[in-house]
Image (spheres, helix red, strand yellow):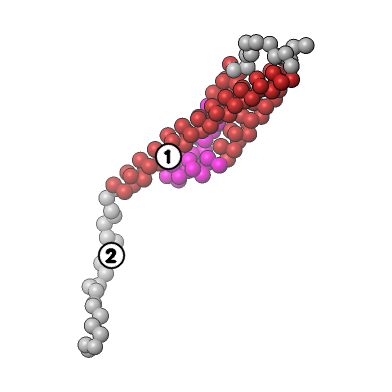
Amino acid sequence: MDWTVGTYVVYLLIAIPLTVWVATTLSRNGRVFLEDVFAGSEGLATAVNRLLVVGFYLLNLGFVSLYLRISDPVLDLRGLFEELSIKIGVVTITLGVIHFLNVYVFNSIRRRHRLEALRTPPLPPQAVLPPHQPFPAPGHG
């Protein structure tokens, strides 16, 4: 009996929901980070978040599809688990690498925005305060 088709099915039943779960989690939790990166511009943060999710799905589901093929037939249950461990391991490592690259890029953007904010000249004074009157030294006065 050949377990290859069963391996394909189990792989897809794990990889696709895993991709959806990671994308949903990153989208939900990354929104606050993106709002900070884009200096409170909620509309831009939402748009970038949606574009990242679409790109994430395209990239990861494309990778899952391309990585589906098995060169040697899977002959038994042990082979199924061994093949799945390799395939799911590579998919999860790839998801992690993509995630860290995204975080690195957006953290760089965020850092640059903060540095630019420090370089902006201060506003002119809005009012003039009266001169400071020093307190008399203890024992004098």
Q: In the rendered image, which residue does mark 1 sit on?
A: 107
The x and y percentages for residue 131 are 22, 73
Residue 37 drawn at (x, y percent): 43, 41
Disc 2 versus disc 1: distance between alpha carbons? 38 Å
Where's the C terminus, which quadrant?
Answer: bottom left
Residue at left offset 42%, top offset 34%: 105
| Dominant secondary structure (helix, strand or loop) of the stretch shown in magenta | helix
Q: In percent of the image, x 68 and y 11: which residue is there?
A: 73
For residue 11: magenta?
Answer: no
Quadrant of the image containing the N terminus? top right
Q: Which region shows up in magenta?
A: 29-55
**Residue 103 on image: x %, y %:** 47, 36
User: In front: 57, or 85?
Assistant: 85
Q: Which of marks 2 and 1 is nearer the N terminus?
A: 1
Q: Is residue 34 above or below residue 2?
A: below
Q: Looking at this view, name the residue that lies furthest to the front.
A: 78
Relative to 80, 25 lies left or right? left
Q: Can residue 51 be seen in this view?
A: no
Amino acid carrying mark 2 in the image: Ala
Picture residue at 42% right of the left edge, 44% below the top: 39
